[in-house]
Image: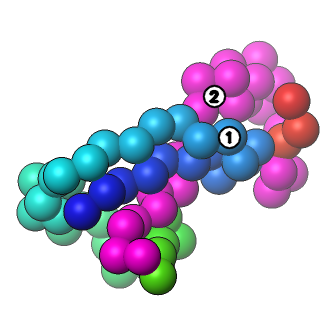
Amino acid sequence: MAVHYYCRHCGTKIGTITDIEADRMGLFFLTDEERQEMVLPQEDGSVRIQSICEECQDSFEREPAFHQYGYLIQ
């Protein structure tokens, strides 16, 4: 299974992990609500994980008010 990580704020692709078993990813630690929000199964059998990239994380640390916006443009 391939897992693709994307930033939930700016849409940038963070990276891809191939040939990993779902059990090894630790997704069972997420609540059902977190899983629905962050883990998006794709039609091709891969999984898209909504995460945060370093640039957006840095932006939030510099400007906490950015948390009120759903999408950041970089």
Mark toward the viewer: 2 or 1: 1
Q: Which mark is residue 12?
A: 1
Circles 2, 1 touching at the beta carbon (< 8 Å): no
Q: Which residues are magenta?
A: 44-71
Q: CA distance from mark 2 to mark 1?
A: 13 Å
Residue behind mark 2? 57
Residue 68 counted in the magenta span = yes
Is disc 1 surrounded by few (<14), some (14 to 19) or many (20+) residues within 10 Å? some
Image quadrant in which you'd find residue 57: top right
- Dot 2, how many residues are within 10 Å of its Cα: few (below 14), some (14-19), or many (20+)? some
Q: Amino acid at mark 1?
A: Thr
Q: Decide: is 49 above or below 13.
A: below
Type of the residue with mark 2: Gln
- Relative side of 59 to 28, left or right: right
Identified at 35% across, 76% down, the residue is 45
40 sits left or right of 31 in the view: right
